[in-house]
Image: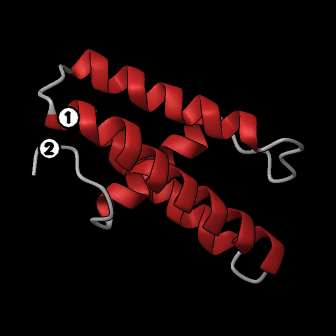
Amino acid sequence: MLHFAMLQKEAAAKLVMKYQSSKSAQRVYTILLDELHTIYMLTVTPVIEAGGDRQAVDLCINQALQTIKAMLGENFLEFTVKDLLGLLYFLAGNCHIRWDKC
């Protein structure tokens, strides 16, 4: 799983860089990263803090990703759930979210 997460984080970083000159795409990325962070902090972190098992945490993450995917609407950048997961790993890799209890 660690290797997969690292690959997805790297892919997300490359996508962000690919669209760095597009103000509209950067705005979409900003909103997505903010939504991912907020939903993670409000739904996933409490499960981790309560000692939830891996399955419960994964379920919360999946629900968060599905919520954000539904929010995308027209999705002109064609984000997949895997792309969103990569952005979540990007946040974790840059210490914006934690996978463990504080």
Write the residue at 15% across / 30% down: 50
Residue 64 at x, y percent in the picture: 51, 34
Pick the residue in front: 12 or 62: 62
Left or right? Give the position of 26 relative to 53.
Answer: right
Mark 2–mark 1 contact, CB under 8 Å? yes
Crowding around mark 2 (Cα neighbors within 10 Å: few <14, some 14 to 19, many 20+) is few
Write the residue at 32% across / 67% down: 94
Q: Provide the secondary structure element on which disc 2 rests.
A: loop
Q: Amino acid at mark 1?
A: Ile
Farthest-out residue, top: 55
Residue 100, numbered label: 2
Residue 71, numbered label: none
Q: Amino acid at mark 2?
A: Asp
Write the residue at 61% across / 74% down: 17
The mark lying in front, picked from 2 and 1, is 1
**CA distance for labels 2 and 1:** 7 Å
Left or right? Give the position of 68 relative to 27.
Answer: left
Residue 9 at x, y percent in the picture: 43, 54
> Which quadrant is home to the N terminus?
top left
Q: Provide the secondary structure element on which disc 1 rests.
A: helix
Residue 48, numbered label: 1
Rendered view: 81 above or below 102: above
Left or right? Give the position of 91 relative to 85.
Answer: left
Pick the residue in front: 81 or 98: 98
Residue 59 at x, y percent in the picture: 40, 20
Tell which circle, 2 or 1, labels the residue nearer the N-terminal end.
Answer: 1
